[in-house]
Image (cartoon, rainbow, N blue to C red):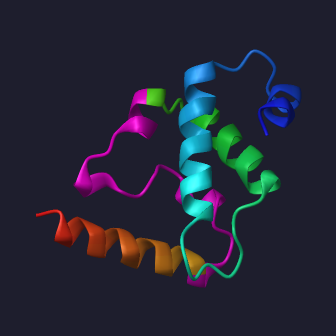
Amino acid sequence: MQAIIDVHFPGLKGRLVHEALNIFYDIREVQGLKKKPSTSELLDWIKLLLNEDVTPETLRERDPRKLIPPLHGALLKNEQDVSLFEKLAFMARREGR
């Protein structure tokens, strides 16, 4: 996956890619998704992260109040998947209290 990212975004900071890939693979592991994020969604998401100047630190943050990654809609194209993901994050946040 790193090689594909390197072709599309040459010179991209390694820390941002590392954090983005961690989130990408974590989301792919969410049970119940109708369409797991693909390489295309990952590339779209990284482009948005760069356009919005999202930092690696923002992606790495594991604050229970911020379990949903920035611009997550780019990774989850199906509205049902977005809803499921947000519900799971809400439930995890409630359990984290």
Let me know if residue 63 is in the magenta part: yes
Q: From this viewpoint, which residue is outermost toward the left? A: 97
Where 32 falls versus 52 (above or below)? below
Q: Is residue 76 above or below residue 45?
A: below
Q: Residue furthest top?
A: 11
Say if the magenta span includes residue 77: yes
Give me the residue at 18% from left, 71% from top.
Answer: 94
Q: Quadrant of the C terminus?
A: bottom left
Residue 35: where, in percent of width, then height? 71, 75
Instruction: From this view, report whether residue 49 is shown above or below residue 26.
Output: above
Residue sitting at 41 percent across and 58 percent down? 68
Q: Is residue 31 toward the left or the right of residue 59 in the image?
A: right
- Residue displayed at 55% across by 43% down: 22
The answer to whether 42 is drawn above or below residue 14 in the figure is below
Q: From which residue to which does the magenta span run?
A: 57-80
Q: Position of residue 47 (x, y in %)?
A: 70, 39
Residue 28 horizontal/vertical position (percent): 63, 63
Q: Nearer the viewer, residue 2 or 74?
A: 2
Q: In the shown orientation, is residue 10 left or right of residue 35?
A: right
Compare residues 75 and 28 and report the one nearer the observer: 28
* Coordinates of residue 82 in the picture (x, y in percent): 54, 74
Q: Quadrant of residue 88?
A: bottom left
- Can you tell which quarter of the image residue 32 is in? bottom right
Q: For the N terminus, which image quadrant? A: top right
Q: How many marks?
A: 0
